[in-house]
Image (spheres, rainbow, N blue to C red):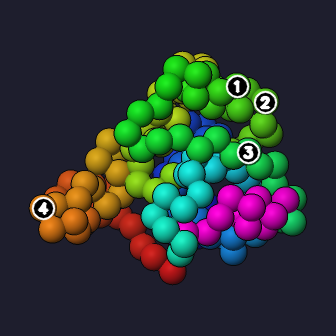
Amino acid sequence: MSTTLPIRQVAADVCVAPQLTPNAMAELARLGFRSVVNNRPDFEEGPGQPTNAAIEAAARAAGLAYAYLPVSPMFQSPEEIARFAQLLADLPHPLLAFCRSGTRSHSAAKAATDAGYPDCYNVLEGFEGQKDASGQRNKAGGWRHAGLPWYQS
């Protein structure tokens, strides 16, 4: 899979990513994905974040199945985990789920494992890590701070 999108495989046909834009949907289709699950509530980080409606329209225009399952970054209920597992069972694969940093993708990886998908992995600190005392990310913890491979388009 050759792409500049920050995609991370968690099972044979399930991947996760941080926030994606509407423009990324055509690239996902080109890469062979058949479904997208958006786990970010609208306006979680303010008006600059792409809305669910915009991402869904772009996904459907690219021929992708799409589901919106917004979950809090602090807590995922058993019902949300069960709903994600149901989406894994119902949506066409390969499937990509995204959130802001990876905390929710941890729940996605757990749900994928519980649904019978082997070899699921996750970086618990997410891509950017937690905020420091001044509210900045990328200073401690996270995929990027750990020096793991990544690139941005």
Q: Which amino acid does label 3 sit on?
A: Ala
Q: Quadrant of the N terminus?
A: bottom right
Q: Earlier in the sequence, mark 2 or mark 4?
A: 2
Q: How far apart are marks 3 and 2 (CA)?
A: 11 Å
Q: Residue at x 73, y 45 (%)?
A: 67
Element type at mark 2:
helix
Marks counted in the figure total 4
Q: Earlier in the sequence, mark 3 or mark 2?
A: 3
- Which secondary structure type mostly characterizes the magenta part of the structure? helix
Mark in the foreground, 3 or 2: 3
Element type at mark 3:
strand
Q: Report if the CB atoms under discs 1 and 2 are less than 8 Å apart.
A: yes
Q: What residue type is labelled 2?
A: Asp
Q: How far apart are marks 3 and 1 (CA)?
A: 11 Å
Q: For residue 118, say whether it is visible.
A: no
Q: How far apart are marks 2 and 4 (CA)?
A: 42 Å
